[in-house]
Structure formats: structure tokens, C-alpha cells
Image (tube, rainbow, N blue to C red):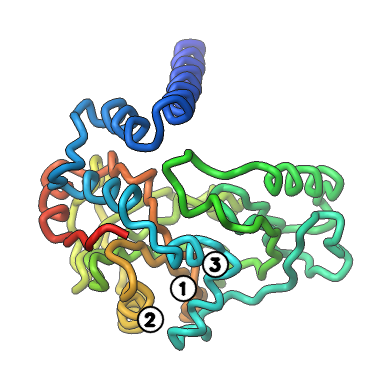
Amino acid sequence: MAENAYLCTMQMKFLNALGHAAEVLVGKVFGDKVQYRFIYFLRTRKRLNLDNPQDWNEKMIWLSLYWRNPLVSKCADKYAVREYLASKGCQDILNEQYGVYGDSRDIDFDALPRKFVLKCNHGSKMNIICEDKDALDIPKTRSTLNRWLSRPYGRSIEWQYKTIEPRILAEKYLESADGKMMEYQIFCFNGKPMFFLVRNDLRNSAADKASERFAVSYTMDWKRVYMRKGEEQFDFDLPRPHNYDKMIDYAKKLSADFPHVRVDYYEIDDKLVFGELTFSSNGNIQSNYKEEYIKSLGAQLQLPPKY
């Protein structure tokens, strides 16, 4: 049984790698539009309608191709977005920052606290969570960070990352009194918060790995709604966050300039902390969501003129 599970895992990894390689090749040869049509078909088995987009996925893809406001790129930058929050009067929720570096050799590890986070500003999944500096392999860490700095992030269709100047950010390690982390994501359409996704399954700290992993949906008036596939398995209710009203108020401010954005927060012992602004959630194809919500949310997202 274990051998069969291992073979299935290896087969999936091979198919994913093969699919990604094919996506890159299609993008290089035929450009962004054809690449998106290819990716969309692979993940949904449907034809992409860009002439008259209707559902949530189609409209997200349309925005990625035809609404390229430079402000999106600025706010996708995990360093430059801090200035944007300040311009909106939301700087009080920014996480403490220890340093910004253009090369990992510039990092003074002796000056950093025992716990900290290192991350690159120009993409996703480029994070090093240090829970004990004494156990950190510093040469390996420097090498990993510089490799990330030299690597353009994302598929070519995630255009917002292309113009970001890569940097390394050193920030405060976030943890609550119980050592666990909850992330509150608010999806916003046309400056209006639409729903919450509350999850603890993204970070890879020891405490987070030890807890039950979940991602659950809530309406804006904090009622459970089962929007994602398989969400019924999480048969529990979460308390309304302490900063519930502030989360919504700040989401309105931070999403006002965009037709579609996801505002991510943490709540650390009743203190609200900003995570990031996300414009290409799940690669612009919400394959984890049920079809009825893909359609109903698409009807509520109003597309702007091309930019």
C-alpha cells in the first residue's frame, strides 16, 4: 500500500512537471493568450471565453491580460506595498521589518533575533521561517536566497512580478500565544469585500504543521458557507476575529483601486497584522471552488475598461 501511494505521488509530480514545462513552452512560442487558454483547459477541461467572460475564473484571467495597471505590480511587491498601505492610512498593521537586502551576503545574522522570517519580495513561496537561529544553516540560507533573487518568479502570465526589483526582506516572526497561526483572506471585487477564507494550512512552522490543517469560508457577516470542494469535512465553527470590523474597513481601503484583489491578514493575540495583497490567487483559476460559486461570483465581478 505504501509503495503504491509512493508511486502515485511520483506520477503526479512527473505529470505536474511535464504540464508546467508544456505551459512554459506554449507561452514562449505562442504568447500569453494562448498559454492561458492552454492552462485553463488543462485545469478545467473547458474552453476559455475571453471575448465575453462570464465566470470568476474567466474574469480573473481577462484582468491579468487586459488590465495591467502599474499599481498592481507595486502592490504585488512585498516591499513597495508598505508605501501603499501608508498612503491609505493603514501603516499601523504592517509587520516589523529588520532589514532589506539586495544580496544575502549583506545580511548580518548576528543582529537578527533568535526567531525571524526571510523572504523575497518578487513572488510567492520564497520564505525561510527561522524558529531558532542557532540551528540555522547560514551558508545554505544565503545560497538559497541568492538563487531566489536571480530567478524570475511565476509564469509569464503573472505579469505583475516582471518589473519588481528583487530584494530580501527580514521581518518579525509572527506567532500567537499558542504558537499557531491563522490567516484571514478577504476577496474583494470592485472595492467591495465579498467573503472570507480562513486558513492555517499555508505556513510551515513546527506549530502549524502539528495542528489540524484547514481552509474554511465565511460570509462577510461571519456565517459558514461551503464554497470550496470538500469543505464539508471541516465540521466546526470559528469565532469571529477580534479585529473583524477593522479587517473589513481596511480591506475596503486597500481594494478601492482594484477590480479584483485578495487582502490577507494575520491576527496575533488580538493585534491585526498585514500579510499581502494577492492579485493572481491560485494562478487565476479557482479550481478549489465549486462551480456554482465560480458562476455566481463571476456575475458580481464588474470588468473595467482595458488598461
Q: What residue type is disc 1 on?
A: Glu
Query: Residue 200 or 108: which is nearer the viewer?
Result: 108
- Disc 2 packing (10 Å; few <14; some 14–19; many ≥20): some
For the C terminus, the image quarter is bottom left
Q: Which residue is mark 2?
A: 243
Q: Where is residue 217 shown, x and y percent of the image?
A: 26, 57
> Where residue 134 is drawn, which disc sits there?
none
Q: Where is residue 7 shown, x and y percent of the image?
A: 49, 12
Q: Disc 1, disc 2: CB below 8 Å?
A: yes
Q: Secondary structure at mark 2?
A: loop
Q: Secondary structure at mark 1?
A: strand
Q: Residue at x 71, y 56 (%)?
A: 130
> Where residue 178 is drawn, which disc sits there?
3
Q: Which residue is mark 1?
A: 267
Q: Residue at x 18, y 57 (%)?
A: 225
Callout in the foreground (3, 2) = 2
Q: CA distance from mark 3 to mark 1?
A: 12 Å
Q: CA distance from mark 3 to mark 2?
A: 18 Å
